[in-house]
Amino acid sequence: MTAPANIRPANDAALAEAAAILNAGGLVAFPTETVYGLGADARNGRAVARIFEAKRRPQFNPLIVHVPGLSEAGQLVTFNPLARKLAESFWPGALTLVLPRKPDSGLSLLVSAGLDTVAVRAPSNALARDLLAASRCPIAAPSANRSGSVSPTTAAHVAESLNGDVDLVLDGGPTTLGIESTVIGFEGDAAVMLRPGAIPRETIEDLAGPLRAADGTISSPGQLASHYAPKAALRLNAKDIADDEALLAFGPDVPTGGRRVLNLSAHGNLTEAAANLFAMLRELDASGIARVAVMPIPAHGLGEAINDRLQRAAAPRETT
Ligand code: TXA
Ligand code: MG
């Protein structure tokens, strides 16, 4: 798509429009103190799927959920004492905390790429805070650039990178920090550096004590173990189904038989399929089915990320 982006100077009218777009499942780019984010309602799986579509990211990486503060974050994730202390000290600000997702968080599973954890952050940028207040929704937002290009620090950068793939760009001027937030996870109650960022390690260590290194095999973002893997064995590109298999279907033409069928998108819509992917894999796992046949998924658009995830889920398990 090459339509120009709809850039709006930040004022009350633009803010109300941006909130309405988020509530209707659209995408809004907005400034934070670090970089511009590409935001969607974190509870709306279709809206979150559109983020990946707009970024043309061929993989589903877990996203940061932006909230006004600790009490709102506490409705989404479970804080350990150190995490609470860090949030009390650095929020609002450029610190992201990866914590266990609450079962009743209401968040799309796509937000955390199927993981049991969610990254949460309360931004300090005034416009970001106004948008959180006006929309009254948790906002999932990666940096507002296409995959592989640098993170945007002005509305013009966003517009150049995303063109018309974002419904509205709120222009709040250049961001003050210019690099992404520091991402901290936890192993038990010990803090782990997952991504260095705008708050220096030393500043966090003054409060938290020595941070563990992100052990590549366990907690480094983008590594195998940071991705959800189903227990069931997956058979990809299945055109038929065996009696002992469940079927993860796609599209209107579904083979009959098997133990159970869940359809990622009966209409063959890849955005809908992306929104359903992790929830359906989990539903099949929860039902205890050991073998799942997966119908072919087209390779274009979000199909690339869906296939990437399915291929990794189908690969022989590595123990970590
Ligand atoms: O400053 C920032 O953090 C910006 C602004 C918009 O808030 N956002 C940003 O998002 O940089 P993104 O999607 O580009 O980077 C999110 C980082 C990635 O390294 C991702 O792997 C990690 O956070 N992350 C998110 N959720 C995670 C999870 N559940 N477990 C482990 N890592 C996670
Ligand atoms: Mg990024």
Image (tube, grey):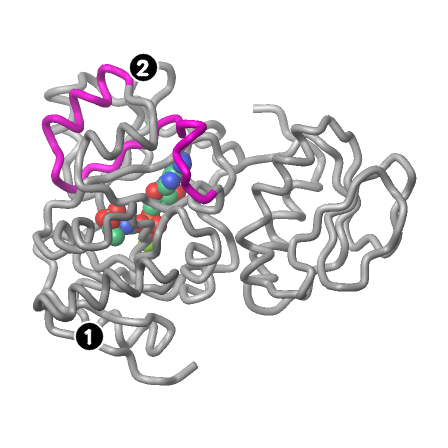
Give the residue at mark 2: 189
Nearest to the observer: residue 6 or residue 307:
6
Give the residue at mark 1: 156
Find numbered disc 2 in the image and state the secondary structure of the residue it sits on. loop
* Residues in magenta, as a range: 80-108
Say which residue appears at 16% left-offset and 42% top-offset: 94
**Residue 89 in the image: x percent, y percent?**
10, 27
The answer, for residue 173, to whether it is visible in the render is no
Say which residue appears at 20% left-offset and 22% top-offset: 84
Left or right of 10: which side holds 157?
Answer: right
Q: Amino acid at mark 1?
A: Ala
Which comes before the other along the chain, label 2 or label 1?
1
**Residue 191 in the image: x percent, y percent?**
28, 22
Nearest to the observer: residue 136 or residue 187:
136
Res. 193 image quadrant:
top left
**Residue 153 in the image: x percent, y percent?**
17, 63
In the rendered image, which quarter contains the C terminus? top right
**Tag 2–tag 1 contact (CB < 8 Å):** no
The answer, for residue 125, to whether it is visible in the render is yes
